[in-house]
Amino acid sequence: MKKVQVLVLAAVASLTACSPHIHLDILGTSELQEVVLLPSAAKDKVLMIDVSGLISTTVEAGPLAREKDLVTQVYARLERAGRDPLVRAVILRLDTPGGEVTASDIIYHEVLRFKERTRRPVVGLMMATTASGGYYIAMACDHLLAHPSSLTGSIGVISIFPDVHELLGKVGVRVNVIKSRDLKDAGGPFREMTEEERRVFQGIIEDYYGIFLDIVLKGRHGRLTGDELRAAADGRIFTARQALKLKLIDEVGYFEDAFRKAKSLASLREARLVSYTHYPKIRSNIYALAPTTTPSLIPNEKTALDAFLASLKSGFYYLWLPEMR
């Protein structure tokens, strides 16, 4: 498969070099370009930004992508929007099971920072899944709307620490670890976790969980009490209607409802809907994810599930990770 990938890249390079009539826009434009998703005679704009996939600062979009991770993508769009006085509101379109604790908090912080320095509203539009870290980010929005079939919630923290010591023993591999103190290799994959180590990690999880609850109480201030939140924050997911009943969201509806709300919060009668992309030549619409990477030219033997699982590493996550057998 690697040989095939090399041949494909070589063919692309050859075509690009040898024929002045062939232009393959592999990397797209160097700067983000604005594309209009819904035209209007109005000059004012509502910007749609996608928060899609695993929330991470390390999982890259691809070797040919202009932007390398979700945090980078969201940050770049908020920064550009902040410089454009015609962008009067933002729709944050969320479709994510969550992800890394720090990455989720960074995006949440950047959305809040955008609102504070621009005084422009942000509406959260939940698509298929807005769970855990995705819901954490949604707490920075002024109004939360979910599609009728959305899944949301999963308020909580999970830690992942693979243990491969039995597998290594079966193939005759022994790992020697020299450490300064007993807990230096806590959570490592080469031995069983001790009860003391479990208590240490549980303490970290409880601290992150407390932060999550504080963020939700701040984001849902005046709409959700602490007792109501604790009853819902046991890690389970909810349908849109269940979430509305539990006061975790404000509305169940569709894109046009989110667009209407964004214009209303910005005191606009009409507005153009726009997005930013490095690939303006790729046609898009209100239901297509804003293209951030070029269509793949290289065969990939991994399935989407394989790639998702491979991206996970030891650590702590605001993530909905259903059990897989």
Image: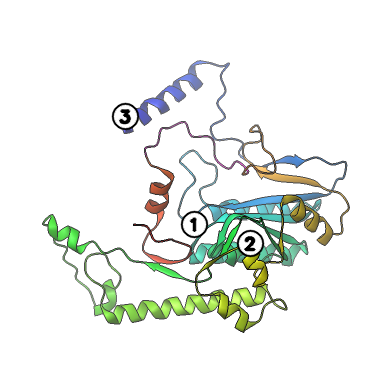
Marks 3/2: CA–CA distance: 47 Å
Q: Is residue 298 magenta?
A: yes
- Quarter holding the C terminus? bottom left
**Residue that carries the numbered disc 3 in the rendered image:** 3
Name the kind of residue labelled 1 in the image. Answer: Thr
- Quarter holding the N terminus? top left
Q: Is residue 194 magenta?
A: no
Marks 1/2 in contact by CB < 8 Å: the verdict is: no
Q: Name which residue lies at 76% across and 62% down.
A: 121
Residue 173 position within the rendered picture, expressed as x and y whole percent measured from the top left: 13, 58
| Secondary structure under the numbered disc 1 in the rendered image | loop
Return the disc, 3 or 1, that comes first in the chain's sequence.
Answer: 3
Name the kind of residue labelled 3 in the image. Answer: Lys
**Residue that carries the numbered disc 1 in the rendered image:** 57
Judged left or right of residue 40, residue 292 is: left
| Secondary structure under the numbered disc 2 in the rendered image | helix
Res. 240 mark: 2
**Range of magenta residues:** 290-301
Residue 264 position within the rendered picture, expressed as x and y whole percent measured from the top left: 84, 59
Answer yes or no: is residue 181 visible.
no
